[in-house]
């Protein structure tokens, strides 16, 4: 997507007022939103305290709201106590035990429904089993699962006993899993035999086995759910079947009441270095925001059927699958499989089958489905839908309009929600029924969220349409608390530049004359592939770990469906370069390196383009000229200053794919 496109559409000033019939039924009206926003400006702590009392079931009520004594490690509701899973599911197990909590559909057509009662029982059984295995409050448990009910059960079982879950996306490789297990020093891994995607098995247990061969690690137990029935290898003394453990465990599993600040989970995300960050979230503030935003942004209520298509391996699958909608008493749809498998109407078929009322997905999925044409969605009854959402990357206006017209049938408001793994929940978004929307803009911050755009000195930019750093001025309850094991990186990354009261998002943005926010992209070396953040350094580290690679530089370029794709420039070691010199062998080397990245990091990190070059363009001080590489990858005219380039002739070579590279 090019920013140029947004600009040109912006000049049309398309704006969509809230649908009247939606507004008439919405939980938040204009007056209420204005009152909340005013309070959020003048007394944010008071606002959050009111909301925390109203929305959460506390075991021990809090008396203090915000503790700044360890800033920028802020503590919210610091003397309160609760249990996240109990606070989330408990009220509905009481009130509506037989209401479906989870409706699961597998790619192969399997389907299962779990009521709130059944979900609660399964959580208790697994919680008891984990306790019996010696998992205690505060211990980390890695969850590496397909998108099936047991993934959610595992998260809640950890929360129920105060253990800290760290979900690793099932599409990540054994190497990525190993790194995360070691960083979190997790003693227990919960997995399944295999999952399914695009008609193939994703062999998770085999990846766990492989990961645990990669080096030293603290894992003593691998708990395996039987899911696909695939045969798996077994390590006696370490591996155990989940069903055997839960059958053997004593009935009941009292909820561990923890401090509001007790870590609920870690979730690893990419930053601008090669090492992923273990983003640490706290219990109460996180749950509050997840639940609250379901009300404010999705207008979610008890009889809604909510489908957020994100995997639980990402933050969206935490906040808007496993926690927020269940805390709201809604029914959650989960689907394990690829969006267009085995046919392009699969998503719409699921919406029709389960009567989905609120649908939340990523622009990359919308673009991919849009490409298949208007006819497919037209074949399905989508009349149950009342609200549509998007997240993960800027949505190009063309895709927004298609979503509005073809999926929403011009009736459903669209919420373009901006947030991050670090923010825990939605921060900038329309409130449906109140906010007029503009395609491509996430509109305005939610109440209590003091978002601003500042220049490089931290001064607020008030002039419309001038880009700058997107920051959040005041702490908020669902913000990350730390980077696991690396507080210094936490302080430097998020507060190093503008002080403790100014959280740096890493995004650039501008505000238009109406005060609407337009996200322009990342400022750090992070690419957004299909709505997933990947550090370019991570891919570079993976490439240079290959025995034939001497150096690598990775940049992004716009991609029609994925948003951005990865473009790698690779310098081979001289012996390998000689070997790969004929063009037939260059191809083989390129394939081998792309497959290598896949194996090291997982398929989402595989470079779409990989160019073998003689050398990387560097300044005289040895810095790789990434801006230049970005322009080359994008096929743009080179108009930047290359006078500091060590080898000026290199640019000519870089701009044409090397067919017969010479050894360096
Ligand atoms: O660059 C922004 C982009 O995704 C980043 C956060 O990525 P992650 O932590 O993986 O979380 C994704 C799901 C919340 C942001 O820094 N991003 C997210 N939502 C939007 C967005 N960019 C534009 N518009 C959005 N609605």
Image (tube, helix red, strand yellow):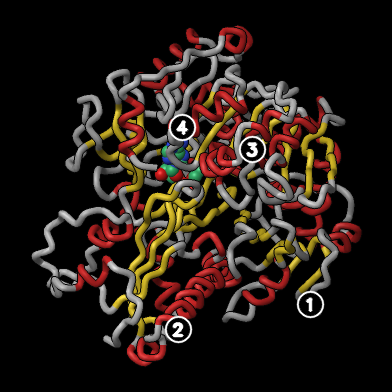
The image's mark for residue 585 is: 2
* Left or right: 503 as drawn, with respect to 592: left
Q: Is residue 469 visible?
A: yes
Q: Which element is circle 4 on?
A: helix
Q: Earlier in the sequence, mark 2 or mark 4?
A: 4
Q: Earlier in the sequence, mark 4 or mark 3?
A: 3
Q: CA distance from mark 4 to mark 3?
A: 22 Å
Look at discs 4 and 3 and give the one toward the viewer: 4
Q: CA distance from mark 2 to mark 1?
A: 36 Å
Place of residue 397 in the rendered image (x, y in percent of width and height, measured from the top left) = 43, 31
Q: Quadrant of ligand 1?
A: top left
State which tag comes first along the sequence, 1 or 3: 1
- Residue topped by disc 1: 233
Q: Could you give the CA–CA distance between mark 1 and mark 4, rounded to whole angstroms?
A: 48 Å
Q: Is residue 222 above or below residue 411?
A: below
Q: Residues within 10 Å of mark 3 (few under 14, many from 20)?
A: many
Residue 489 position in % (x across, y down): 36, 58
Q: Is mark 1 within 8 Å of ligand 1?
A: no
């Amino acid at each position: 997507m090019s920013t140029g496109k947004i600009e040109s559409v912006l000049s049309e000033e398309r704006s969509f007022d809230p649908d009247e019939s939606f507004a008439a039924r919405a939980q938040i009206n204009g007056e209420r939103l204005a009152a909340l926003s005013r309070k959020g400006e003048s007394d944010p702590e008071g606002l959050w305290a009111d909301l925390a009392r109203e929305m959460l079931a506390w075991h021990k009520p809090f008396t203090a709201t915000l503790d700044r004594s360890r800033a920028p490690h802020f503590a919210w509701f610091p003397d309160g106590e609760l249990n996240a899973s109990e606070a989330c599911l408990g009220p509905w197990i009481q009130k509506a035990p037989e209401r479906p909590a989870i409706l699961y559909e597998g790619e192969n057509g399997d389907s299962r429904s779990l009521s709130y009662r059944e979900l609660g029982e399964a959580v208790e059984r697994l919680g008891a089993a984990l306790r019996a295995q010696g998992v205690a409050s505060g211990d980390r448990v890695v969850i590496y699962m397909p998108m099936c009910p047991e993934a959610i059960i595992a998260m809640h079982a950890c929360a129920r006993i105060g253990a800290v879950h760290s979900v690793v996306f099932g599409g990540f490789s054994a190497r990525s899993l190993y790194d995360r297990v070691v960083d979190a020093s997790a003693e227990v891994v919960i997995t399944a035999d295999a999952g399914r995607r695009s008609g193939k098995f994703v062999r998770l247990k085999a990846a766990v086995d492989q990961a645990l061969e990669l080096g030293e690690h603290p894992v003593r137990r691998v708990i395996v759910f039987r899911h696909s029935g695939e045969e798996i290898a077994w390590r006696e003394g370490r591996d155990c079947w989940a069903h055997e453990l839960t059958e053997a465990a004593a009935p009941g599993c009292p909820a561990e009441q923890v401090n509001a600040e007790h870590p609920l989970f870690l979730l690893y995300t990419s930053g601008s270095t090669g090492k992923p960050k273990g983003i640490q979230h706290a219990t109460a503030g996180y749950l509050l925001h997840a639940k609250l935003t379901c009300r404010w942004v999705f207008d979610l209520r008890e009889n809604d059927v909510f489908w957020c298509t994100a995997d639980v391996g990402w933050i969206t699958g935490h906040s808007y699958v496993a926690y927020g909608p269940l805390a709201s008493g809604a029914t959650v749809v989960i689907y394990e499989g690829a969006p267009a498998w085995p046919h392009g109407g699969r998503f719409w078929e699921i919406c029709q089958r389960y009567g989905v009322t609120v649908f939340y997905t990523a622009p990359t999925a919308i673009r991919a489905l849009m490409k298949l044409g208007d006819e497919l969605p037209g074949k399905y009854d989508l009349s149950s839908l009342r609200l549509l959402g998007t997240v993960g990357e800027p949505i190009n206006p063309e895709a927004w309009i298609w979503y509005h017209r073809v999926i929403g049938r011009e009736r459903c408001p669209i919420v373009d929600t901006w947030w991050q793994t670090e923010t825990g929940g939605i921060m900038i978004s329309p409130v449906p029924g109140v906010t007029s929307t503009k395609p491509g803009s996430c509109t305005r911050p939610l109440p209590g969220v003091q978002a601003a755009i500042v220049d490089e000195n931290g001064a607020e930019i008030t002039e419309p349409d001038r880009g700058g750093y997107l920051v959040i001025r005041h702490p908020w309850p669902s913000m990350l608390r730390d980077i696991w094991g690396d507080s210094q990186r936490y302080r430097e990354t998020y507060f190093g530049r503008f002080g403790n009261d100014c959280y740096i998002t890493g995004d650039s943005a501008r505000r238009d004359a109406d005060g609407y926010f337009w996200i322009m992209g990342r400022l750090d070396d992070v690419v957004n592939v299909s709505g997933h953040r990947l550090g370019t350094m991570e891919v570079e580290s993976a490439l240079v770990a290959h025995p034939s690679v001497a150096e690598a530089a990775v940049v992004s370029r716009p991609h029609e469906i994925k948003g951005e794709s990865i473009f790698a420039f690779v310098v081979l070691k001289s012996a390998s370069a000689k070997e790969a010199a004929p063009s037939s062998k260059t191809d083989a080397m390129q394939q081998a390196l792309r497959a290598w990245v896949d194996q090291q990091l997982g398929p989402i990190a595989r470079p779409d383009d990989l160019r073998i070059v003689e050398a990387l363009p560097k300044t005289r001080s040895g810095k790789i000229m990434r801006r230049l590489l970005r322009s080359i990858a994008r096929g743009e005219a080179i108009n930047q200053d290359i006078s500091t380039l060590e080898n000026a002739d290199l640019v000519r070579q870089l701009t044409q794919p090397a067919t017969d590279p010479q050894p360096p």
